[in-house]
Amino acid sequence: MAIGWKVVHDGNTPPPGESVAPDERLSWGRTLGLGAQHVVAMFGATFVFPLIMGLNAQLAIMMSGIATICFLLIVQGKVPSYLGTSASFVGGVAAIRAQGGDSADVTGAILVAGVVLLLVGVLIHFAGPRVLNAVLPPAVTGAVVMLIGFNLAPVVADIYWPQDQWVALATMAFVILVAVGIRGFLGRIAIFLGLIFGYVVSVIIDKVGGPITSVLPGQNLLDANGNPCEAEGPYCVATAFAHDRVSWDSVRAADWIGFPPHTDSAAGVVGWHGPSFSLTFTLLVLPAVIALIAENTGHVKAVGAMTRRDLNPVMGRAIAADGFGTALASSVGGSPTTTYAENIGVMAATRVYSTAAYYVAAVVAIIFGLSPKFGALVATTPGGVLGGITVVLYGMIGLLGAKIWIENRVDFGNPVNLVPLAAGIVIAIGNVELLVSEDFTLSGISLGTIVVIAFYHLCRSIAPSHLRESDPGTMLATGQPDMYKVDEHETGSGTDQRRSDPSDPPERV
């Protein structure tokens, strides 16, 4: 059932080795505590990615809660998951903005991608996953995920890192050390902890060393003659100036309670707004749909393995629900959504799979989204901090593609896999352009994805039979169900249960 839970273990913490099923719950007090853990797990990435995409983080948090409730209802409570902000669209969004698109263009393109994902989910629900595996085998899926991540390298190098290179370096180092050196739940939220670390370091340096002189995109715009100008472009560029790393003026002025602001381009305010649609911009983000299919498939299989339930019959529902959540959020100017591995990690550690905790987390997120002061605080995150975080995140998104290849044993001794995938990846990383007409250009991620998919299937159709048969192509995404295991490591305070494999995709630590 979607709502309604059976109380188990007399509402107390489950005994060692016992678990709580999705349709069960503990006492409401313990359920509230578990919901709080889910909020912490999803929180960092859910508001970092909107900042990176130039969207409103307060609105993203609120819509993530609403989308999660919709997701749980659509899957009838069978797949406990939280829908946080997706990283898969970051590359496409960067490309849209590089071509002069604004926030309405961004959310319009994402909305269309959400509808496409929804329709794919409906198709999988009725036709079964075999159709999807035939179109998007592991070789193709891994390549698309890889090119999405690595295409983002210039965003780090040109936008975030130069704003404060030393804070960026310190934040990067902190994230790496925490992610690798600390076990348990804290290791899983290294990105969130890194953001706090970088924020605090930035405040301390402001107090001790004073302002920094650097370039902030969209600010201090000057033309070739050094005169102020309005719209950033070839003849009106942002130039270096002295500024504090962290300014709390907007936080002091913000109300404690209220809806996210309306977008005001003239005032530089990004908030809720209606979408604008463009075929060119839509094509830039459509490759993210492939990444979301892979991500959702892996996550559903991970949850199925942990709960010891066959969730294949609701795989299509889960993918469609994510598409619905993405379309719903972007229709009002929010960020795209996806199921979150961090929250799957919380379930692995606690053995509590109750959807009641996810409803609690969703309600808390909605409450956060109704605080403009919270939104203003998030918006003050220094660019140098984002530089340190994104240099790790973007690389890890790219390496997820390699992870998919390895787990599905893709053979790169086979030219059917090697040649078209190599071409598509280099096209995306180099941001190669194909001028189709005066008004339409394919480039980067979109062109690379088309090359990977089209030429992979063309090569398979003309290749000798022994080359076609050597590619296993049995799974769409990450890992076989029996690979999702939970290891138990004794600690001083009890048992730290962690998944030994792949159900914790590393694009969000």
Image (cartoon, rainbow, N blue to C red):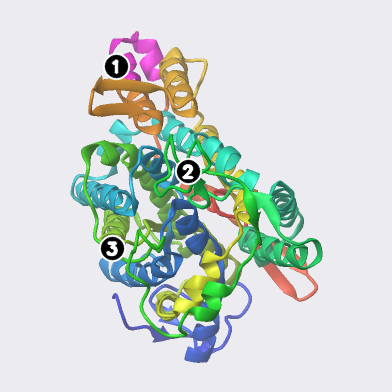
Q: Is 172 rendered above or below residue 204?
A: above
Assign a secondary structure to mark 2: loop
Q: Earlier in the sequence, mark 1 or mark 3?
A: 3
Residue 300 is situated, as x and y percent measured from the top left of the image, at 41, 55
The residue where tag 1 is placed is: 458
Magenta run includes residue 298? no
Amino acid found under the numbered disc labelled 1: Leu
Q: Give whichever of 332, 24 is nearer the camera.
A: 332
Residue 110 appears at what percent x and percent y?
A: 30, 50
Mark 3 packing: few (<14 Cα in 10 Å), some, or many (20+)? some
Gap between marks 1 and 3 measured at Cα = 42 Å
The residue that appears at 75% across and 62% down in the rendered structure is 210
- The amino acid type of the residue labelled 2 equals Thr
- The nearer-to-camera label among 1 and 3 is 3
x%, y% of residue 188? Answer: 63, 60
Inspect the magenta stretch and tell me whether residue 462 lies in it. yes
Highlighted magenta segment, given as a residue range: 455-470
Seen in the image, is 207 located left or right of residue 376? Answer: right
In this rendering, which labeled residue sits more in front, label 3 or label 2?
3
